[in-house]
Image (cartoon, rainbow, N blue to C red):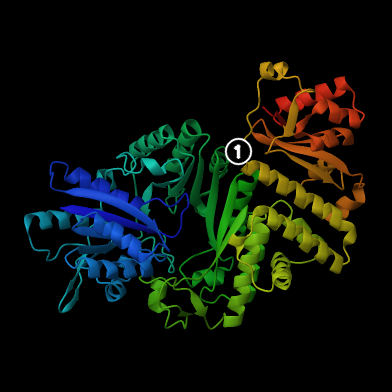
């Protein structure tokens, strides 16, 4: 008996890991390890792949049973694929599972000719299904297995929650080794104890089951040995068990200091120590703010304390942790005015990024059950997004959508956290008003609303500069524009260096052997030469400046600087103009000696400077 598990990802990315299929694979392999007649294989594709291509690949395996994980993003394409498979291989047993199968089984059965759907956690149900298939036993009353029969869909009893201690690890089994260098989905827990009415994460049980720390330790060791670089932690309330969370963070600090982690956390459970621990490792946090209106959040089973939220986020800011928020527009009782207030509040907390989504009314959630009563008009098919509500009209939702896109481009992708609020205040605009002005400006520039994914970082930087030049001019704030542009430019260079691979800095003995004046040199790709209107070190020393006050205190003397990666940080060095020009003219072809002569720099002076630049990784020799 051959079971083939298929995953259809939304796109190629570090998160395109077939984790659900790997959990099933590990469980089946461990359970039937003495059963030579049971074979399990996996395959994954991305949405947009031709159905014929996928169907041909699946049928070529010769599998008798094929299983699919169904999500909001792949439900429609999986349905078309299953229809194709049914036509090509009528005798093939087709299984569906995952969140969509659990939330909307009748709709799935209506859309695609599945034989069975696995409702809820799949490992236990699949093992029992395969065991009965092997033994030729009937499938009646198999917990978690929904069957299609002539008289309609037969609903099963729900399976009991699985004991996570007994589940084999998909990572330790080796099935996912090929994915480790690109990115890892690391599941530390299942379930959620909160009851947010728009969310399906708790699956109605409001319980959290956590994998044992011994397993967590073994998996982390395994991932580090196999070259992991980034990890997306699957635990929607990672810091709810604060003692356990701190133990894991300390373990990461010790075992994986160079690996980047992404966590979902609840603000209610943050404390000063955990903020420091998050800041001590390479990680980013995502916090589900959703709305800053206690009244709106109450309609979906959430509570919110504005002052407590700000206090807890201040802990993260003081520790230097990287974090972002989720915001939802279109919740019951929400409006464009309320959403704009939430956006203003969120940006006032200095998040590194905001992820903003329209409300999705997911099947199986409490909100879906009440949506008709609450007059929440929404798409009946994936992605189930809100179309209108009594308090959020169609035109206002369109404006919210434009605000979300503008925030993504100008603030999040534009790495604007360090200067955004200063510039908004200088322009006497609220954060949301500034973003809406940007949305209007870019629409006038290109003739349509932009798609954030279409813009490279350098393009966004150029858009920011052009927009600010325009808006400061319109607001008669030309005197503050040079300082605003200095802040934008500095933080763009800083972010670009942080995202670049760290340069290899030569050892002192290597530098001593290089005849820097006769050797062609070039600027290191990760370094940035920059000119500023003000002394950039003085400007940065002010922290987050009030532009008008800072402009009255500082003189626009101008400065030349090089920014580069060194000593696990971005370094900024002010340079005399002639040194700046020397670095600028290093082209990898002409020896530095000739370039220095044209600039009036003596041989000894240029030799000393270039030796330091080599040792710091600012320049590199060009080998011929």
Camera-side residue: 163 or 78? Answer: 78
Horizontal side, residue 602 vs residue 319: left or right: right
Is residue 597 positioned above or below 447 on the image? above
Q: Which residue is drawn at the image coordinates 14% and 65% (left, top)?
A: 141
Looking at the image, how many numbered discs can be counted on the residues?
Answer: 1
Residue 79 appears in the rendering: yes
Read off the residue under disc 1: 501
Where does residue 203 sit, x and y in percent of width and height? 34, 63
**Residue 178 image-quadrant placement:** top left
Compare residues 520 and 349 and report the one nearer the observer.
Answer: 520
Which residue is located at x 58 percent, y 54 percent? Answer: 324
Q: Position of residue 239 (x, y in %)?
A: 47, 48
Left or right: 355 as drawn, with respect to 469: left
Q: Could you say which is closer to the camera, residue 171 or residue 306?
A: 171
Q: Position of residue 495 (x, y in %)?
A: 67, 46
- Looking at the image, residue 250 sits to the left or right of residue 487; the answer is left
Left or right of 607 in this view: 553: right
Where residue 413 appears, as percent x and y from the top left, is 63, 56
Closest to the observer: 295 or 71? 71
Tell me which corner region of the image, top left, top right, bottom left or bottom right, holds residue 364: bottom left
Mark 1, other Cα within 10 Å: few <14 / some 14–19 / many ≥20? few
Evaluate whether residue 546 shows in this view. Answer: no
The quadrant of the rendering that contains the C terminus is top right
Q: Which residue is most to the left?
A: 136
Is 301 situated above or below 182? below
Look at the numbered disc 1 and give the secondary structure of its residue.
loop
């Amino acid at each position: 008996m051959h079971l083939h598990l298929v995953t259809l990802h939304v796109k190629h990315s570090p998160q395109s890991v077939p984790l659900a299929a790997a959990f099933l694979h590990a469980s089946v392999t461990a359970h039937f390890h003495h059963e030579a007649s049971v074979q399990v294989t996996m395959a994954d594709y991305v949405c947009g792949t031709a159905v014929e291509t996928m169907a041909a690949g699946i049928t070529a395996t010769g599998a008798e049973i094929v299983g699919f994980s169904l999500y909001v993003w792949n439900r429609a394409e999986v349905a078309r694929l299953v229809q194709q498979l049914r036509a090509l291989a009528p005798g093939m047993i087709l299984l569906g599972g995952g969140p969509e199968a659990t939330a909307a089984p009748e709709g799935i059965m209506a859309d695609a000719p599945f034989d069975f759907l696995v409702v809820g956690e799949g490992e236990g149900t699949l093992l029992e299904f395969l065991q009965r298939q092997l033994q030729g036993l009937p499938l009646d009353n198999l917990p978690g297995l929904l069957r299609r029969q002539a008289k309609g869909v037969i609903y099963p009893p729900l399976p009991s929650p699985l004991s996570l201690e007994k589940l084999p690890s998909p990572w330790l089994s080796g099935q996912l080794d090929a994915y480790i260098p690109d990115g890892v989905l690391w599941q530390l827990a299942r379930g959620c104890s909160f009851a947010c009415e728009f969310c399906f994460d708790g699956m109605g049980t409001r319980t959290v089951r956590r994998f044992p720390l011994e397993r967590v330790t073994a998996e982390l060791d395994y991932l580090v040995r196999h070259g992991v670089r980034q990890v997306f932690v699957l635990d929607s309330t990672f810091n709810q068990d604060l003692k356990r969370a701190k133990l894991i963070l300390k373990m990461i600090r010790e075992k994986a200091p160079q690996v980047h982690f992404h966590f979902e956390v609840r603000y209610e459970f943050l404390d000063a120590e955990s903020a420091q621990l998050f800041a001590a490792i390479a990680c980013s946090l995502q916090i589900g703010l959703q709305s800053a209106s206690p009244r709106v959040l109450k309609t979906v089973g959430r509570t919110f304390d504005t002052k407590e939220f700000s206090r807890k986020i201040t802990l993260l800011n003081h520790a230097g942790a990287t974090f972002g928020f989720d915001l939802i527009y279109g919740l019951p009782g929400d409006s464009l005015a309320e959403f704009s207030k939430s956006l203003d509040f969120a940006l006032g907390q200095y998040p590194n990024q905001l992820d903003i989504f329209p409300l999705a009314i997911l099947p199986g959630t409490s909100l879906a059950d009440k949506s008709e009563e609450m007059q929440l008009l929404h798409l009946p098919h994936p992605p189930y997004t809100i179309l209108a509500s009594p308090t959020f009209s169609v035109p206002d939702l369109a404006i919210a959508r434009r605000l979300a896109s503008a925030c993504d481009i100008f603030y999040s992708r534009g790495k604007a956290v360090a200067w955004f609020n200063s510039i908004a205040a200088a322009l006497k605009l609220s954060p949301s008003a500034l973003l809406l002005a940007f949305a209007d400006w870019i629409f006038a520039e290109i003739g349509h609303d932009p798609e954030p994914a279409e813009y490279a970082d350098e393009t966004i930087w150029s858009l920011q500069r052009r927009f600010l030049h325009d808006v400061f001019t319109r607001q008669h704030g030309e005197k503050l524009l040079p300082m605003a542009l200095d802040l934008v430019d500095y933080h763009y260079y800083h972010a670009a260096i942080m995202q670049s691979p760290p340069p290899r800095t030569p050892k002192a003995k290597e530098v001593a052997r290089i005849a820097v004046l006769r050797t062609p040199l070039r600027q290191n790709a990760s370094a940035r030469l920059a000119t500023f209107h003000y002394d950039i070190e003085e400007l940065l020393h002010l922290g987050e400046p009030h532009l008008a006050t800072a402009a009255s205190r500082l003189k626009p003397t101008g400065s030349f600087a090089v920014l580069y990666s060194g000593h696990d940080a971005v370094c900024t060095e002010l340079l005399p103009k002639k040194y700046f020009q020397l670095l600028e003219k290093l082209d990898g072809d002409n020896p530095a000696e000739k370039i220095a002569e044209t600039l009036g720099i003596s041989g000894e002076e240029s030799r000393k400077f270039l030796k330091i630049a080599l040792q710091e990784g600012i320049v590199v020799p060009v080998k011929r």
